[in-house]
Image: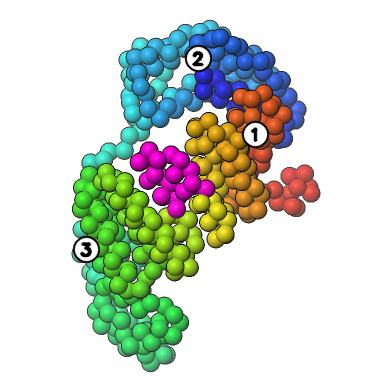
Amino acid sequence: EGRAEEVRSDWDELRALLAQDTPAIALSGMAPAPRAQEPLVRFGLDVSEALRRLVSPLDGLVLVLAPVWVGDARKWAQDIQLLLARPELARARWVVVESDGPHLTTLVQSLGAQAESVDARVSDAAVAGNMAQVLAAMTAASAGATGFQAIGAAGPRADPPPRQVSTASLNQAQPQGGVDGGMQKGATFMGIPSALMDKEFQKALRLKVFGAAHSLREGRAAEAVREQTEARDLCLAAGLMREACTLEVALGGYVMQAGQPQKALQLFREAGARATSQGLPEVAVQAQLAQGAALLTLQRTDDAVIAYSEAGRLGMEGSSPVLAIEGYRMAGQLLAARGRLQEATFAWRRALETAEKASPDERRSSTAPEAARQLASLCRKHGLKAQAESLEAQALVLESPPVDAKSAASGGA
């Protein structure tokens, strides 16, 4: 049933897009949805109707089926086979993306030249091997390594010689891995923490952060948590509060991966409080969003709604519209799933109001278009066709690149 709703929603979106960009191609609206039908039958009927309503030069549709997971692999394969067998759907081309498969290998083989299979899975062993090599190269590199060599690329084994500049304090050779007096005074005068000028510190921090990520990918969650904790503590001791708070949010994610959502929730709360006290509103919003995710994992949905709503408010106050939009959107999604439709509508509206105040680039990189489509789907289910079409058109505008004023004035020529 959900896929049938998506067919109709996508059809209306296609109509709106063509009306905006190619008005010469006018597609008619679909008839009322068939009732009392099996979901697969209704889906097939809707695709068939969409194909019948195509006008020249459009002569077919490409449909992408990408389930998050497949509960019944046999039924999934049977449903796809039934769709492929229907002659009225012959002008449809099907793209199936399976993240937990493959489930359709036998079907694909039976279709011969009519089907093509692509295996785009990442080799975990190869990735782990590459990362191990990178870490080894980072460890072997000198503390003074710069650029890509500092993160594992090839480079000279020795530090580059000091530059010959006119300033006496900077003309002296720096001690290996340390900070010379002139740089120390200059950094202090400019308000830059001395740790950021300490090459040994930078190398140690890089190795901790990269090492934690590598450990997590290899399934060594406890080791990842230990290394990430050490990285955070290094930053705390050095007075790098922004870096410490950011690493603490990531640490909470590692603890989640280790199967300890309650402990992760506490870390996210501590990171948020620390970020707020240090005047780091964007990091505070990130920590608040992470709290929502942890509460969801703990199946505390109502508390997660509150956390996401608070993230929206903090994002608005902290001039982080992209994060604010995601907070309100997630709150709306959870409220809708709980049947609290009026509150869900309010949350999605807040997301869209926030998007209106954001820059074009922020709007496009946010989940505001998704919020508009979620609200449109809710309107459509309740017979509010005009509102749904307006919201779908708004989603297109939100994700469209800004039109250059000069190009618009000249008709795009």
Residues in magenta, as a range: 288-309
Instruction: Give the secondary structure at mark 3.
Output: helix
The x, y position of residue 171, in whole percent, is: 35, 88
The quadrant where residue 250 appears: bottom left
338 in relation to 58, above or below? below
Q: How is the image coloured?
A: rainbow
> How dense is the environment of label 3, judged by Cα within 10 Å: few (below 14), some, or many (20 and up)?
some
387 in relation to 127, above or below? above
The x, y position of residue 385, in whole percent, is: 69, 26
What residue is at 40 percent from the left and 22 percent from the top?
116
Looking at the image, is mark 1 or mark 3 nearer the viewer?
1
The quadrant where residue 210 appears: bottom left
Q: Is any part of residue 18 visible from this angle?
A: no
What residue is at 66 percent from the left and 30 percent from the top?
388
Which numbered disc, 1 or 2, marks the residue that appears first in the sequence? 2
Per the rendering, the mark at residue 39 is 2
In the rendered view, does 407 fall on the left or right side of 265? Answer: right
List the residue tagged with mark 1.
392
Which numbered disc, 2 or 3, marks the residue that appears first in the sequence? 2
291 in relation to 141, above or below? above
**Farthest residue in the bottom direction?**
168
- Residue 119 is one of the magenta-drawn residues: no
Per the rendering, the mark at residue 139 is 3
Q: Nearer the viewer, residue 336 or 206?
A: 336
